[in-house]
């Protein structure tokens, strides 16, 4: 086994991990390195698998009674917003594959002494988001520890017959497009964004073969698609002065 790269670059680590994994089952059609994994169930049936975590101080600052606000950029999040954000991050990755979410499981690590109210509010936000997007909360786990709040969501979805849009699916001549506006995270957009589930379904039904959930900026994530697809990109659109 080769040594892991001595860097904090997530994508360099994933590239190394993929090179070291043992042979995968033929039913695993798409493994590490994309927005979600694809597992083939039947000849034309595919499940979409995703897990994602949000960590206090890294992905949000918490606004709750008795909780110290850390020196992190952006507005504080209520516990309900944390629950919603965690679910929507997974939903956005399912959407980037063109999938339909089915069910999720949630695991939360609460700071010691946080109290029952914090846990209730987090799961209230999670439950409301599940109802909004038609996702069943199938179970999970709750722990407490001597650290910040952490919430992990694992989700399963399905493709309903279409092939998923993957990072390695871009072809020469493809148009570069986004489904919404970019930026605004520092103003709290990351707490209120809408997963593009309807748009993702529409796009795969009409033959789009490559998509990505933009989380590292347009240029950074375009580079991910091009690396996986062995392509180059050119953006010719003017950037508006107010952008």
Image (cartoon, grey):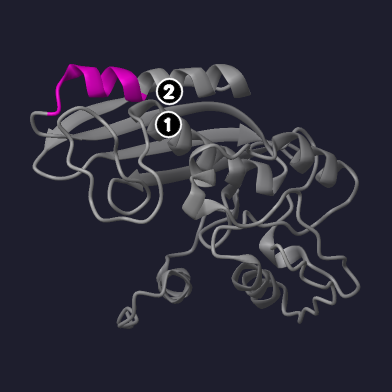
Q: Dot 2: few (<14), some (14–19), or many (≥20) neighbours within 10 Å? A: many
Q: How many marks?
A: 2
**Separation of residues labelled 1 and 2 (CA atoms):** 6 Å
Where residue 36 appears, as percent x and y from the top left, is 56, 50
Taking depth in this image into account, of 140 and 212 the one nearest to the observer is: 212
Q: Position of residue 50 (x, y in %)?
A: 51, 43
Up-down relation of residue 29 to residue 241 (above or below): above
Question: From the viewer's perspective, is residue 230 above or below residue 97?
Answer: below
Disc 2 secondary structure class? helix
Q: Which numbered disc, 1 or 2, marks the residue that appears first in the sequence?
A: 1
Q: Which residue is mark 2?
A: 125
Residue 38 visible in the displayed image: yes
Inspect the magenta stretch and tell me whether residue 119 lies in it.
yes
Tell me the residue that label 1 is attached to.
81
Horizontal and vertical percent for residue 84?
A: 46, 30
Q: Is residue 102 magenta?
A: no
Quarter location, residue 231: bottom right
């Amino acid at each position: 086994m080769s040594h892991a790269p001595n860097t904090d670059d997530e994508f360099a680590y994933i590239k190394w991990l993929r090179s070291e994994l043992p042979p995968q089952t033929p039913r695993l059609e798409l493994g590490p390195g994309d927005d979600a994994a694809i597992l083939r169930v039947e000849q034309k049936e595919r499940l979409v698998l995703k897990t994602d975590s949000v960590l206090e101080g890294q992905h949000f600052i918490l606004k709750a009674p008795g909780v110290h606000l850390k020196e992190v950029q952006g507005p504080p999040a209520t516990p309900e917003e944390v629950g919603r954000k965690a679910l929507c991050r997974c939903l956005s990755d399912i959407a980037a594959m063109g999938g339909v979410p089915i069910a999720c499981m949630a695991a939360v690590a609460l700071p010691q002494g946080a109290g029952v109210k914090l846990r209730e509010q987090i799961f209230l936000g999670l439950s409301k988001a599940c109802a909004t997007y038609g996702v069943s909360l199938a179970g999970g786990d709750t722990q407490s520890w001597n650290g910040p709040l952490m919430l992990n969501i694992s989700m399963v979805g399905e493709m309903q017959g279409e092939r998923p849009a993957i990072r390695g699916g871009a072809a020469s001549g493809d148009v570069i497009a986004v489904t919404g506006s970019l930026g605004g995270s520092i103003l709290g957009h990351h707490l209120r964004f809408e997963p593009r589930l309807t748009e993702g379904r529409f796009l795969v039904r009409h033959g789009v073969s490559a998509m990505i959930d933009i989380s590292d900026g347009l240029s950074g994530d375009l580079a991910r698609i091009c690396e996986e697809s062995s392509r180059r990109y050119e953006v010719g659109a003017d950037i508006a002065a107010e952008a």
